[in-house]
Amino acid sequence: MRLIGAALFTILLGAGACAVPQVTPAAAPQVTPAAAPQVTPAAVLPAAEATAGGAPAGLEFAALQNATYAGIYDDPVQLHDGRYEGEPFVAGGASRPTVTLATSAAAYGDLTGDGVDEAAVILAESSGGSGTFIYLAVVGLAEGAPRNLATALLGDRVQVEELAIADGQLILQVMRAGPRAPACCPEEALTQKWALEGGELILVAGEPIQSDE
C-alpha cells in the first residue's frame, strides 16, 4: 500500500507539473516590473537632497568635507573628501590620527545674529585606540570660503541622533553611555543646547557628556 500511495503521489505531482506552464506566463510579467524602479530613488535620494538643500553658497556639504578644522589637535587639520589622516605614530605602523566628518548630521542657521547662516557639523576623531571622540564644529564664511569658527568636544563614542539650529542655538539629541554602561554601548538619551559666544561653543542647557578615561 505504501508503494501504491507513493506511486499515486508521484502521478499527482507529474500532473501538477503539467499545469505549471499555463500559470507562470500569466503571473511573472505583472510582479517584476512593478517593484524594482520605485524603491531605490525613494530610499536614497531624499537624504542627500536634504543635506545640501538649505546650504548657503560656499557652505555646501562638499565644501565642509574639504574645510580646515581646529580644536582637535594642537594644529588645525584639513579634510580631504571628509577625512584627515596623519602620520603613523610608529614608522610603518597602522595606528595614526584620523578625523572624519559625519555624513549623517549637518545643520544650517544663524548662530551669530548677523542674518547669515552658519553650518554645524559632527567630527569623529580616533587615534587607533578603543575611543572615538566626537566633536561639534561650527563653520562660517570668510571671503566666500568656509572657515571653522569653533569646535567643542562632546564625548567618547557619543551617538548624535539629531542636530539642528533654532533661535540662534544648536540643539543636539544624543545617546551616551549610562552610569553603569560601558562606553561602547550608548543607552541614555540626552538633549543639549549650545551657543556660539566669543568664538567658543558654550553649553547653555543640558548636562555635559563625561568621557570615560
Image (cartoon, rainbow, N blue to C red):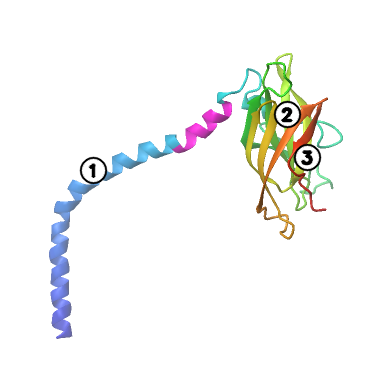
For the residue marked with disc 2, what is the amino acid?
Val
Q: Check disc 3: other Cα within 10 Å, few if <14, some if 14-19, many if 20+.
A: many
Dividing the image into 4 quarters, which one contains the N terminus?
A: bottom left
Q: Residue furthest top?
A: 143
The part of the image, by quadrant, that contains residue 112 is top right
In terms of secondary structure, what is the magenta stretch mainly? Answer: helix
Query: Is 75 situated left or right of 182 in this image?
Result: right
Helix, strand or loop status at disc 3: strand
Residue for badge 2? 138
* Mark 1–mark 2 CB contact (< 8 Å): no
**Disc 1/disc 2 C-alpha distance (Å):** 53 Å
Q: Nearer the viewer, mark 1 or mark 3?
A: 3
Please state which of residues 162 and 128 is positioned toward the viewer in this rendering.
162
- Report the residue at 58% width, 23% height from top: 54
- Indicate the amino acid at tag 3: Leu
Residue 71, how many percent across, how many down?
Answer: 82, 34
Magenta highlight range: 43-52
- 213 drawn magenta: no
Q: Magenta span has 45? A: yes
The residue positioned 13% from the left and 60% from the top of the image is: 18
Q: Which residue is mark 1?
A: 29
How many numbered circles does the render carry?
A: 3
Distance between mark 2 and mark 3 Cα atoms = 12 Å
Circle on res. 120: none
Tell me whether circle 2 and circle 3 mark residues in contact (CB < 8 Å): no
Residue with the mark numbered 3: 153
Q: Is residue 14 above or below residue 36?
A: below
Rendered residue at 67%/55% (across/down): 185
Q: CA distance from mark 1 to mark 3?
A: 56 Å
Tell me: residue 61, above or below residue 10: above
Residue at (71, 39) in percent of width and height: 192
* Residue 105 drawn at (x, y percent): 63, 36
